[in-house]
Image: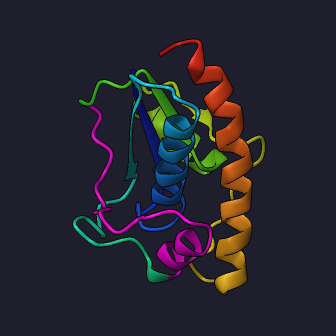
Amino acid sequence: MRVEIVCTGNICRSPMGEVVLRAKLAGAGVDGVVVTSSGTGGWHIGDRMDPRAAAALRRRGYDGTTHRAQQYQRSWERDLVLAMDSGHLETLDRYGVAARLFARDDVPDPYYGEDDDFDEVLAQLEKAADDWVDRLRDQA
């Protein structure tokens, strides 16, 4: 099973979601799920994760050092596409991709915020990832 997590530039929310979901799946012993992330825009292609996002992950014991931003490609075959907010859902819908929200509510973009905003986003992503682990366990 292939899961894609999508945000705007693929340097904050979606890579954080990718790292968290991957770690939680591994911790739950769920095999057979490949988790990747991307952005709807391509201006950060090849960039590392935003340092504040990486620091928030480190503070909670996650490692985001291998991430490099990429842009979502319509040609990719994914079993599940998870969007960070309703704007990403709309963009993916225009691409003809049936996506779902990663969390129950839109995950706010912390890019123009402070370190605390990244920590709050991470907490929201961790909670949502727990829900996805339960759902994906039966499908893997």
Q: Which residues are magenta?
A: 52-74
Q: Is residue 135 left or right of residue 55?
A: right
Q: Residue at x 68, y 51 (%)?
A: 126
Q: Position of residue 81 (x, y in %)?
A: 48, 32
Q: Position of residue 22 (x, y in %)?
A: 47, 43
Q: Residue at x 25, y 64 (%)?
A: 45
Q: Position of residue 92 (x, y in %)?
A: 47, 37
Q: Magenta: predominant secondary structure element?
A: loop
Q: Quadrant location of residue 56?
A: bottom right
Quick check: is 72 in the magenta stretch? yes
Seen from the viewer's position, the closer of residues 12 and 64 is 64
Q: Is residue 81 left or right of residue 114?
A: left
Seen from the viewer's position, the closer of residues 59 and 12 is 59
Q: Residue at x 66, y 52 (%)?
A: 125
Query: In the current view of this chain or complex, which residue is farthest to the bottom?
Result: 114
Seen from the viewer's position, the closer of residues 96 and 106 is 106
Q: How many marks?
A: 0
Quick check: is 27 in the magenta stretch? no
7 is higher (above) or lower (below) than 62:
above
117 is higher (above) or lower (below) than 130:
below
138 is higher (above) or lower (below) than 108:
above
Q: Is residue 3 left or right of residue 106?
A: left
Q: Position of residue 63 (x, y in %)?
A: 43, 64
Tell me, yes or no, if residue 90 can be seen here.
Answer: no
Tell me, yes or no, if residue 6 can be seen here.
Answer: yes
Query: In the current view of this chain or complex, which residue is farthest to the right?
Result: 105
